[in-house]
Each structure stands twice: as C-alpha cells, then as structure tokens.
Image (cartoon, rainbow, N blue to C red):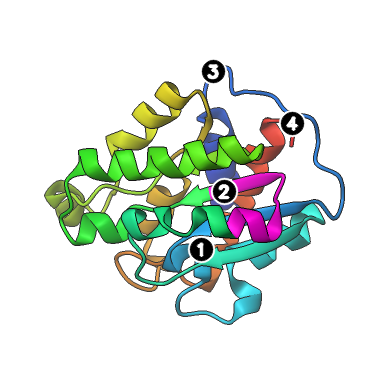
Amino acid sequence: MRYLWVLLLSFVVMACGDKPQKYNRLSSGATVLAFGDSVTFGYGVDPKDSYPTILAELSYWNVINAGISGERADQAKSRIDGVLAEYNPKLVIIELGGNDFLQRRNAKAVKEDLRAIIQSVKAHGSIPVLVAVPALSPVAAITGKPSDADIYKELAKEEKINLIPNVFSDILGQENLKQDHVHPNQAGYRVLAEGIYQALSKMGL
C-alpha cells in the first residue's frame, strides 16, 4: 500500500506542469491558508486528520484551515477578502468546486468564481495555488476512475498560477482511500496532504 502512495505522489509532482512557477522557500512558521470546502475542512474525520493539519506537520508552516463544508465557489468568493485580511497568508491553497458540480452549476460560472478568488489572492500579495477537483461524470461513476474537471487546467494556464492536478481524483478512484464518492477517508486525507506537500516542494515552496 505504501508503495502505491509513493507512486501516486511521484505522479502528482510530475504532473504539476512542465515548468511550474518557482518560488522562494517559505520559512518555518509561515502562514498558509487552506481555503476550500468540506475536503479542506476534513469532513468525516477528527480535525487532527484533516489535510491542513497534516500539511502543517509535514511543512512546519502555520496552516490555517479555512474550509467550510457544503460551500460553493460563489459563496467562497464572498468571504475570501475577509479571510485574507484576517490571516495575511504567504500562500493560499484553493480547493473548491465539488459542491458546485454536485449542484449542477454551470462550469463556466464556477470557473469565473474561482478566477475571482485567485485574483483576490493575487491582489492581496499572496501566492495562489489551485487544487484540481474531479468532474461529475457518468463515465467516472461507471468506471470508478474520476478525472479532473477541465476548468482547473484552463484556469491555471489563463491566470498563470500553479495547479496541483490528479491527486484528489486519484484518491477518489481508490476504495481504500475514500469514505464516500466525494470525500477521502482518514488514509485518503493523509495522501492528499502528502501529495499537496510534494507538489508545493516541487514549486520551491
């Protein structure tokens, strides 16, 4: 099992892009904002097993869990400025869109809501990094192999920011790493945290 995780993490790092933007390394204790929905919040597990908590243990950063269960991208857009002002993070990890897809919101509208969040992060002077979320797909439901929604790759390219692809989708493609069709389990949250940490390391952070 551990070997499978290593392969997954290696794939994520390679998939971050041929030339991901490079940044200076964040110092120990730097404030990082994990901004998202129930997957960021850590739905179904103890707070110590959420991905932001595990990421803090791996990185020695001060990782703020700003996840709200059930939140859509349009709702998150309205609170990002306040959260940025409160915590003044160096880095913001954005994981949103799953609830929008479940509620059948138009993908273009979701993309523009995410763009507004990214631009708010940029305007604040923080580094935005986007985590790709699986598309709601009949094919994936049949095959059990989710894949990232197209809007994330498009948005990362258009906004010239780094994307962490595949890790979330790959977790939901493995029964032993998920608690339901949209949430990782305890082991899955650890794989998510490790995948994000490895991708951020590849960016120099």
Say whether residue 160 is magenta.
no
Stretch of the chain drawn in magenta: 83-93
Residue at the (53%, 35%) spot, across then down: 11
Is 197 on the left-hand or right-hand side of 111? right
Spatial distance from mark 3 to mark 4, Cα to Cα? 14 Å
CB within 8 Å, label 2 to label 4: no
- In the picture of the structure, the residue carrying the numbered disc 3 is 18
Which of the two discs, 1 and 3, sits closer to the camera? 1
- In the picture of the structure, the residue carrying the numbered disc 2 is 93
- Residue 100 visible, this orientation: yes
Is 114 on the left-hand or right-hand side of 65? left
Classify 191 as above or below 124. Answer: below
Q: List the single residue furthest toward the top.
A: 19
Question: What's the amino acid at mark 1?
Answer: Thr
Mark 2 neighbour class, 10 Å CA radius: few under 14, some 14 to 19, many 20 or more: many
CB within 8 Å, label 1 to label 2: yes
Residue at the (43%, 51%) spot, across then down: 168
Q: Which mark is residue 40?
A: 1
Question: What's the amino acid at mark 2?
Answer: Ile
- In the picture of the structure, the residue carrying the numbered disc 4 is 204
